[in-house]
Image (cartoon, rainbow, N blue to C red):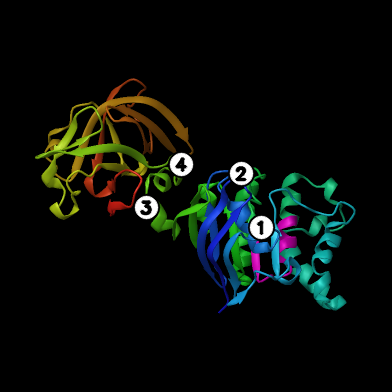
Amino acid sequence: MNALELDRLSKSFGTGWAVDGVSLRVPFGQRLVILGPSGCGKTTILRLIAGLDQPSAGSLRYGGIDWGDRPPARRQVAMVFQDATLYPHLSVRGNLAFALRELRLSARDLQARIGEVVDAFGLGAWLDRNPQTLSGGERGRVSFARGVIRRPDVLLLDEPLSGLDSPGRWQLQSVWLEWHRSYPTTTVHVTHDQQEALTLGDQVAVMRAGRIEQVGSPTALYQQPANHFVASFLGSPGMNLVSVRFTEGAVVVGSGGVTFPRDRIPPADLPAPGRSMSAGVRPESIRVEPGAVASPSEAGDAAVVVIPGQVSELRMAGRSWLIAFSWAGGRWWAWREEPGSLATGQPARMIIPLRSIRWFVDCDTEPKIAAD
């Protein structure tokens, strides 16, 4: 099957590398989401795939055919932008039909193709309206439909959902996923919204400063981040991180002297002499309970670490609560179904299962111990 392949693709605009040696492979029909902060090079990759920019180095292939010298019009690529780029003088129907002009369909096939996206994206009430009479969310939906109506070889999505309100975003995500199940399209979607990336991507590539930090399934990236950047960028909030030191008999967590016995970590997983480490824990893996002193059962449980501190903030987040917990290692976040008897300023303790801790060697390098 055809696949989109980027091989050490690079782009410089004369002031540094906007894209620096990116290699990616997107199998036919898969959705790759490139996730990263603003300015990391995500949109530049889309422009290189579309042929709007030319690479400074590297190659780009689809189905084994080099696209390097192929003009944009011959790449069978459709692009949906953050701002809905609709023709203001055409109705919604006219915008959809215009996207199909190069296919030279019969009148019957043209109407059938338009009818498919109208039904899928719920555009029936707007067909004879011009874009300026639609809301921003409605224009975004029409723009998305116009991008997929051609059934291109490659669909490029440049943060098309970022301008929508939360209900509109969730609704369009569902519509898009349902359409993709019916008409699988090789898709490259860029966003800075990590929740969107985890929801919509078969594969997610986390990008920073022109380079790919890690590529994998949403589950793999969330549970096994390769470094601090990926760990903190994925999640809302991201992974809690703290430096650790290994002494002869103990593990010292943070700068405040919180320790637990070194023998709780298998010897094979300990760092080499002279290597520093850090620990990361997802907020949902932490239990926060009132009282800084561990209960007898907790104190004797070799499978957990108990850390004293205090509650510094309570924040409602839908059906759950976010608890900000201040301790010697900093300020960490944890989830709780209900605040219960917890109150701001109250002494409390974190209870962390050892199996949920992810260890990183030398802070921003590859992880040493995988989480369960």
Q: Secondary structure at mark 3?
A: loop
**Where does label 2 land, which residue?**
166
Q: Earlier in the sequence, mark 2 or mark 3?
A: 2
Quarter location, residue 278: top left
Asked if labels 2 and 4 touch by Cβ distance under 8 angstroms, the answer is: no
Indicate the amino acid at tag 4: Ser
Q: Which residues are magenta?
A: 143-156
- Residue closer to the observer: 356 or 23: 23
Residue corresponding to mark 1: 47
Residue at the farthest left position: 249
308 or 230: which is nearer to us?
230
In this rendering, does residue 64 appear at all?
yes
Residue type of the residue flagged with mark 2: Ser
Furthest-top residue in this view: 345
Position in image of residue 178 (x %, y %): 61, 64
Q: Secondary structure at mark 1?
A: helix
Distance of mark 4 from mark 1, alpha carbons?
29 Å
* Callout 2 touching callout 3 (CB < 8 Å): no
Lower position in the chain sequence, tag 1 or tag 2: 1
Q: Which residue is mark 4?
A: 236
Q: Residue at x 31, y 21 (%)?
A: 346
Mark 1 neighbour class, 10 Å CA radius: few under 14, some 14 to 19, many 20 or more: some
Horizontal and vertical percent for residue 148? 70, 65
Q: Is residue 181 left or right of residue 222?
A: right
Residue 155 is one of the magenta-drawn residues: yes
Image quarter where the N terminus lies is bottom right
| Dot 3 crowding, Cα within 10 Å, few <14, some 14–19, many 20+ | many
**Disc number at residue 226?**
3
Mark 4 or 2: the one toward you: 4
Above-or-below relation of 77 to 139: below
How crowded pointer 2 is (Cα within 10 Å; few <14, some 14-19, many 20+) is rated as few
Cα separation, mark 1 vs mark 2, equals 27 Å
